[in-house]
Amino acid sequence: MRKHVLCLLVVGLGAASIVSRAQVPASCIDNAVINCYNGCNDPLSFKDCIIGCAIGSNNDPRNCREKCPEPPVCESNCIKSSVAISNCSFVAGQLTATCGVAVLNRATGFWSRTVRATNTSQEPIGDIAFVVDSLAAGWSLLNGDGVTEDYAPAGMPYKNVPTLAAGQSSTFTLQFKRTGTLPFGYVTRVITASGKG
Amino acid sequence: MRKALILGMLATAVSHAAVLYNNTTGDQQFSAVYSTGFTHIGDRVQLGAESTLDSLDTQFYNVGTDATFDATVTFYEAGSPLGNAIGSSFTVTGISITGATSQTVSFTNLGSLLVPADLVVIFTVQNVSAGGDIGVNFFDPPSVGTSSNTFFITNDGTGFAESWTLLDIDNLYLLVNGDVANTGIPEPGTWGLVLGALGALAYRRSRHS
């Protein structure tokens, strides 16, 4: 049994350069929007919530900010359904990431985790970032290139990944600092530049 | 005197205490640390042949402050990623380790444990005193024996699995001493020693008579 073969990827794909809408199964879009609708339980914000979910079906979070008449409820639900649709795209097999175990570099005192991202699609994937979501308490990413803004959850550190041609892999190392003796862990997300904010 | 020499030759013929696996040169300066989420850390190694083990050394690192801990080694048959345990576990207790240093620990009580040529060696640590934060060190590929550079073995509490750093350094510090097991078919050199010793005994007896 091999573990850590794939990092747990939650992908927010906003740009057509990574996954075109045509590649996303229609049933996935429907499910994402319906799930979003089902979360619209507050009578006071019901209309804005529904509108946000619908706008999110366009699978581009930039539309959320521009097209929502009544943010922030509309915008947050727009992003919610947009990201859910993008997840379908990843599951359909656009990008995989293999993560190594986090190990201590005794020479530097920092922790390293090497990641190998592979474009499994037939199209180039460019301008993407590997997001470290919900990093375990006591850990911080040292060599990030920024923090997310457009994609929820915002404020998560990310590392840019070079453009990947069809079938190409890229290996990069995330460098962490740990305070205390807390276990390591995070949820992985891959986004495009449009989602960085 | 001559008798002692002959007995020595015979003893040599039946015993080959040797280094069976040596992965102790070339410190990679990387450590896998238990507190990051592992209950067990080990490696799959290949000895030259089925062997009996006398001792095993490994190297721990303490990311924390001065501490004491107990360490246990268990041998397994190779599998996916490991098979049945071989014999019982072996524990060294009360190991003192300074903060931010490496400590080589010897398991000298292996009692000629018979192991296959392809096996998995797993380490756990227990009773780590306050402030201690223990891991195991990665070293260059072995100079005696073989081991894959691309994976080692871990258990994150849900089960054993192959893991990797993706740095191609996935070999733990290990020094294994023991004997190649008696397969029942002596090597030519062994036959030579035995025949030589028996010949010397016969010659000595004939001269006495």
Image (cartoon, coloured by chain):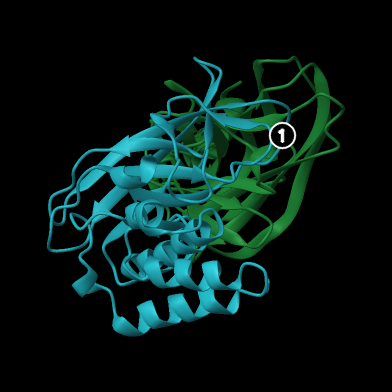
Residue topped by disc 1: B108
Helix, strand, or loop for circle 1?
A: loop
Q: Which chain carries label 1?
A: B
Quadrant where the C terminus of chain B is found in the figure? top right
Residue A125 placement (x, y as % from top left): 19, 51
Mark 1, Cα crowd under 10 Å, few <14 / some 14-19 / many 20+, is some
When the figure is inspected, residue B151 is found, relative to residue A51, above or below; the finding is above
Residue B188 in sight in this render: no
Residue B184 in percent (x, y) is at 48, 61
Q: Is residue A54 left or right of residue A163?
A: right
Tell me the quarter of the picture where residue A15 sits.
bottom left
Quadrant holding the N terminus of chain B: top right
Image-quadrant location for residue A43: bottom right
Residue A184 position within the rendered picture, expressed as x and y whole percent measured from the top left: 62, 41
Comparing A176 with B10, the one in front is: A176
| Residue at screen point 58% across, 50% down | B154
Residue A102 visible to the viewer? yes
Residue B48 or A94: which is nearer the viewer? A94
From the viewer's perspective, is B168 left or right of B66?
left
For the point 59% across and 59% down, the residue is: B160
Residue under the point 12% across and 63% down? A122
Q: Which residue type carries mark 1?
A: Thr
Answer left or right for A107 relative to B48.
Answer: right
Chain shown green: that is B
Q: What letter labels the chain drawn in cyan?
A: A
Determine the residue located farthest toward the bottom in the rendered image: A27
What residue is rendered at 56% in x and 59% in y? A73
Question: Residue B71: where, in percent of width, then height?
Answer: 75, 37
